[in-house]
């Protein structure tokens, strides 16, 4: 196992760790990463700060987290591979007052895998047989994907290491997208306010199906009903390997969430599934503006009640909103949406 000995706000998985800006607001942090990969995402406004966050492995020349963020592997996102023989890595903050800025650092244990990682900025992939794709960004982003042909699709707000595998399902992640019917639409669209998302295109029985992905930095607050979608609270991860910390924190994330789905061409039936951990004063509010109906969800799920898993009938104007409880930053929610016709 590896670790960083600081009292920050890391999110812990079975096979990796995810660090945010608060984790580096110290003079230095030491970690044990033998054989690991270090991925870094730095927004342009954080570049000057990241250039003074220096990584030292006691063998090679120092390298800033900004330098690591610029590494590429063809069109894929690059990473720093820590030598197996290196027992300790030190990250030193050379900024005045140990200042930090929005930054995401994902440290992955050694994996013998060909799964790919991409940066969300101006991402264009396919159409192709994609398999497992992880997209990373310290900034919120919007992603769309289309599949030509049958396909099953799963997605979670973590790296590819958190997918269920032959080793089991140690991370116990909730899928934010779950399309089990290969003959139904596998087109998706959503905004992401978490640093990682992994999509698994399960097309092993559909060799001729091709999928594409488009992603861009920034949140689109108005979407249509053209694909499966989800809305989640800022920093939502949805995994339970480390119950004490399941929310990723960033100063780029707003305290409120509001997403609208709108179509001026037709009406839709929309199946919704919710996962809510929020008090009654901070409910998830779903407004079906077509039919003048409102749903308010709070408490803790799963309780599988019909009121929190409705099918909205014949709507073309839907809004989902939530405001964070500033006294309990671990509250969260996820709502999955599937247009049925």
Image: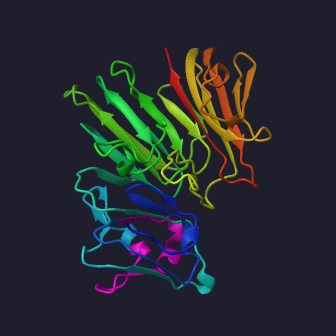
Horizontally, residue 13 falls left or right of residue 231, namely left
Residue 322 image offset from top left, x and y in percent: 70, 40
Q: Within the magenta stretch, is there residue 65? A: yes
Residue 280 image offset from top left, x and y in percent: 78, 37
Question: How many marks are shown on the rendered structure?
Answer: 0
Residue 269 image offset from top left, x and y in percent: 56, 15
Task: Examine the image and state in which quarter residue 37 appears.
Answer: bottom left
- Who's the residue at 29% across and 84% down the image? 60
Horizontally, residue 200 falls left or right of residue 252, namely left
Q: Nearer the viewer, residue 150 or 239?
A: 239
Horizontally, residue 28 falls left or right of residue 202, namely right
Quarter of the picture containing the N terminus is bottom left
Q: Nearer the viewer, residue 153 or 189?
A: 153
Q: Is residue 217 above or below residue 49?
A: above
- Who's the residue at 69% across and 18% down the image? 290
**The magenta segment:** 38-67
Q: Is residue 321 above or below residue 237?
A: above
Hey, which residue is sitting farthest left in the picture? 207
Q: Within the magenta stretch, is there residue 52? A: yes
Residue 171 image offset from top left, x and y in percent: 44, 48
Task: Examine the image and state in which quarter residue 296 appears.
Answer: top right
Colour scheme of the rendered structure:
rainbow
- Who's the residue at 47% across and 46% down the image? 157
Q: Is residue 252 above or below residue 232?
A: below
- Who's the residue at 51% across and 38% down the image? 190
């Amino acid at each position: 196992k590896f670790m960083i000995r600081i009292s920050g706000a890391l999110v812990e998985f079975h096979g990796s760790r995810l660090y945010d800006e608060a984790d580096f607001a110290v003079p230095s942090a030491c970690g044990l990463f033998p054989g690991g990969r270090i991925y870094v995402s730095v927004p342009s406004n954080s570049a000057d700060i990241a250039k003074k966050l220096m990584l030292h492995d006691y063998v090679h020349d120092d390298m800033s987290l900004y330098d690591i963020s610029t590494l590429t592997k063809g069109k894929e996102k690059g990473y720093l591979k820590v030598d197996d023989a290196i027992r300790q890595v030190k990250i030193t903050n050379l900024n005045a007052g140990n200042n930090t800025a929005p930054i995401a650092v994902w440290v992955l244990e050694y994996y013998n895998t060909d799964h790919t990682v991409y940066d969300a900025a101006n991402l264009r992939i396919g159409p192709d047989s994609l398999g497992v794709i992880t997209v990373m960004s310290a900034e919120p982003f919007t992603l769309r994907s289309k599949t030509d042909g049958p396909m099953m699709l799963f997605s979670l707000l973590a790296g590819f290491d958190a997918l269920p595998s032959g080793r089991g399902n140690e991370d116990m992640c909730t899928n934010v997208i779950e399309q089990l019917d290969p003959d139904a639409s596998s087109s998706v669209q959503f905004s992401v306010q978490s640093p990682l998302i992994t999509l698994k295109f399960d097309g092993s029985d559909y060799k001729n199906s091709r999928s594409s992905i488009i992603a861009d930095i920034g949140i689109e607050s108005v979407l249509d009903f053209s694909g499966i979608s989800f809305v989640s609270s800022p920093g939502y991860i949805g995994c339970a390997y480390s119950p004490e910390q399941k929310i990723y924190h960033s100063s780029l994330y707003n305290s409120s969430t509001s997403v609208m789905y709108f179509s001026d061409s037709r009406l839709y039936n929309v199946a919704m599934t919710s996962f809510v951990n929020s008090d009654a004063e901070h409910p998830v509010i779903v407004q079906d503006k077509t039919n003048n109906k409102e749903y308010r969800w709070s408490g803790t799920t799963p309780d599988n009640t019909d009121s929190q898993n409705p099918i909205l009938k014949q709507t073309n104007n839907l809004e989902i909103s939530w405001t964070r409880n500033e006294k309990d930053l671990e509250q969260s929610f996820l709502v999955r949406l599937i247009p049925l016709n």
